[in-house]
Image: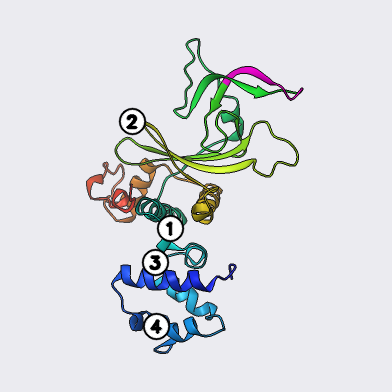
């Protein structure tokens, strides 16, 4: 089990039960425990069983990490809105309902600008700024850089990053970062950040794992996307063709089957963005 904080668990249980419209007794029945179990465990010195926690999390549509580790009652309305979005991203990624693209650490750390200073990436810009050099004195440098929420211009890419196309011409970016100049004993050198970009609106920082309320779900999202991309992927156009075949939209009795009507293929409807 994740490090157990009893107050957090029961605070979340009562909050999620109320949000779901369930009654405490209904959750107890669905989780396979006797009536009054939640009240008894709340007042007792012991811990509730792991089987109950797993089933309760499933019934309340929340991860075990969140149920045990994040006090949902202390999140602001915007934080809760963001948190629900991240939880859904994790769930949809783990069920392979989303299409993620990888941007390698090498490619991102070697981006270049054109003669006018333009960079072919919406999160990167050619900037001039001061940064500590080998002699520990700030020196002016000019380079393509990602201006992160964690480290500002003093940012480099630490690992592979990911992006996904949302609706309304918006792209979601997962950025794995490291402070570009740091001392050996500096513990504040790594961060994972989530950004949004829309051509008509520009960039928007969403959250990072440096915020303790979001740390677990942000780390889970990065891990889920990395695991998803370890396996072979099919482009959406080819999925549509295969789905049509599997649903017998094509007359397999004759050769040279015509292109199926993809309007009735439900693949797009399964993707939430």
Disc number at residue 201? Answer: 2
Is tag 4's residue or tag 1's residue first in the polypeptide sequence? 4
| Quadrant in the rendering for residue 74 | bottom left
Mark 1 residue crowding within 10 angstroms, few (<14) / some (14–19) / many (20+): some
Is tag 4's residue or tag 2's residue first in the polypeptide sequence? 4
Disc number at residue 28? Answer: 4
**Is residue 14 at least partly visible in the picture?**
yes
Is tag 1's residue or tag 2's residue first in the polypeptide sequence? 1
Mark 4 residue crowding within 10 angstroms, few (<14) / some (14–19) / many (20+): some
- Provide the secondary structure element on which disc 2 rests: loop
- Considering only vertical position in the picture, is 128 above or below 182? above
Please provide the residue range marked out in magenta: 135-143
Location of mark 1 (residue) = 91
Circle nearer the viewer, 2 or 3: 2
- Check if mark 1's residue and mark 2's residue have beta carbons within 8 Å: no
Is tag 2's residue or tag 3's residue first in the polypeptide sequence? 3
Is tag 3's residue or tag 1's residue first in the polypeptide sequence? 3
Q: Position of residue 271 (x, y in %)?
A: 34, 50
Distance CA(mark 3)–CA(mark 1): 10 Å
**Front in this rendered view, residue 19 or 222:** 19
Disc number at residue 61? Answer: 3
**Front in this rendered view, residue 193 or 183:** 183
Distance CA(mark 4)–CA(mark 2): 47 Å
Q: Count of labels shown?
A: 4
């Amino acid at each position: 089990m994740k490090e157990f904080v009893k107050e957090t668990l029961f605070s979340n249980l009562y909050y999620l039960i109320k949000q779901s419209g369930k009654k405490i007794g209904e959750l107890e029945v669905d989780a396979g425990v006797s009536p009054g179990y939640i009240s008894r465990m709340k007042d007792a010195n012991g811990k509730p069983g792991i089987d109950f926690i797993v089933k309760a999390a499933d019934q309340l549509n929340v991860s075990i990490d969140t149920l045990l580790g994040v006090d949902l009652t202390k999140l602001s309305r915007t934080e809760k809105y963001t948190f629900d979005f991240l939880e859904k991203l994790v769930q949809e990624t783990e069920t392979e309902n989303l299409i993620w693209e990888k941007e390698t650490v090498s490619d991102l750390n070697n981006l270049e600008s054109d003669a006018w200073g333009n960079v072919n990436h919406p999160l990167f810009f050619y900037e001039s700024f001061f940064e500590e050099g080998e002699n520990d004195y700030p020196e002016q440098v000019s380079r393509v850089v990602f201006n992160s929420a964690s480290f500002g211009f003093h940012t480099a890419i630490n690992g592979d990053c990911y992006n996904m196309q949302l609706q309304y011409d918006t792209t979601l970016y997962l950025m794995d970062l490291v402070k570009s100049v740091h001392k050996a004993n500096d513990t504040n050198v790594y961060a994972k950040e989530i950004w949004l970009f829309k051509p008509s609106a520009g960039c928007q920082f969403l959250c990072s794992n440096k915020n303790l309320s979001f740390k677990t779900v942000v780390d889970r999202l990065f891990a889920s996307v990395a695991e998803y991309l370890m396996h072979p992927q099919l482009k959406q156009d080819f999925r549509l063709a295969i789905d049509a075949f599997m649903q017998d939209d094509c007359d397999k009795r004759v050769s040279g089957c015509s292109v199926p009507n993809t309007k009735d293929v439900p693949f797009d409807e399964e993707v939430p963005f």
